[in-house]
Amino acid sequence: MKNGMMNEELRYSMKKKSAVICLICVICVPWMLASCVKDELYNTPHPDKGVVSVSVDYPQGAEEDDYTVEVDGKPLDEGDKASNPLTPGEHTVLVYNTPEGFTVTDGIAYVERVDGTRALTDLIDPLPETLYSGTKTVTVVADDTLHLDLSVAQRTRDLRLELTVTEGDPERIAAITGTLSGVAGAYDLRSETLHGEAVSTAPAFTRSGDKIEADLRLLGTKGEAQVLTLTLTFTDGLTQTVESDLTEALANFNGDMEQTFTVTGSLRTPTEAGLGGCTITDWTNGGGGSGSAI
């Protein structure tokens, strides 16, 4: 009988321990499973959003601090290469510099006017520093970091005007001023197209012997015509103005922006004081590149 009672107590103790073990399993196993599931589902601290990490291929010699990186029009903080968490879907990344002679407002790069305004009658800076930009639309996925390699392209092109005095005495030319109409004054960095109406610029002309030269840096030609207007002042005080149509000579200017575009021509001046007028002939396009005036 004593043995029976001991067996009964043993069975009761075992049942009690089994109940405790079951209770522990009921409480702990779901918690452990939930913890495992959470770790497997989320790869980032932003499970419902994504991030874009941008690496820019800058031009040789460029300083990273000279460039701005934007995502959907919002600049990244200086030194940051990754965006804030973004909602899944398409987003636009833009990188650009702001060189001397340009201002950038809401994705538009404007060549500065000589007097600092934006009136169409004002002349733009004929030789700003070189503008670079690049843009790409990306698709952001939730709980992920998208690594984007973005390159920039040159958006301005150098133009060189060269005239040779083929008639008259070049030493009689005391001063030369001029304007070139039908050029672009702004560039849309997001759509990568010229922006706004055609404007004019006033390059600085210099003379050395029978050669007259001017250097410009332009976003491109724009409008139906490009006209060069020169005013020559002679040593005797005589002043003459001559206009010349450069539309055909500059027809391919909006092409390879990295190659200098050179245009040459002949300038005929009065052979004697007060006799005859000035004319420009024989314009020749000495620079390559495909493209057309806009």
Image (cartoon, helix red, strand yellow):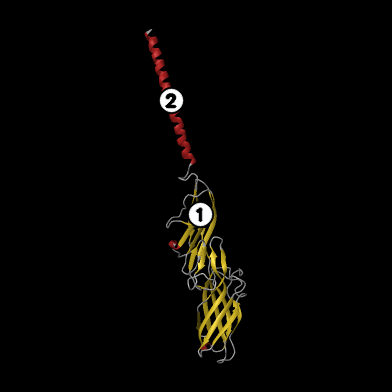
Which secondary structure lies at badge 2?
Answer: helix
Image quarter hosting the N terminus:
top left
Q: Which residue is mark 2?
A: 23
Of 199 and 34, which appears nearest the observer?
199
Q: Amino acid at mark 2?
A: Leu
* Sequence-first disc among 2 and 1: 2
Near mark 1 (Cα within 10 A), the count class, few <14, some 14-19 or many ≥20, is some
Image quarter hosting the C terminus:
bottom right
Tell me where residue 157 appears, x and y as whole percent: 54, 70
Tell me where residue 84 appears, x and y as whole percent: 46, 51
Viewed as shown, does residue 26 lie left or right of 283?
left
Outermost residue toward the left in this view? 2
Q: Which residue is mark 1?
A: 148
Near mark 2 (Cα within 10 A), the count class, few <14, some 14-19 or many ≥20, is few
Viewed as shown, does residue 21 lie left or right of 268?
left
Tell me where residue 191 appears, x and y as whole percent: 56, 61
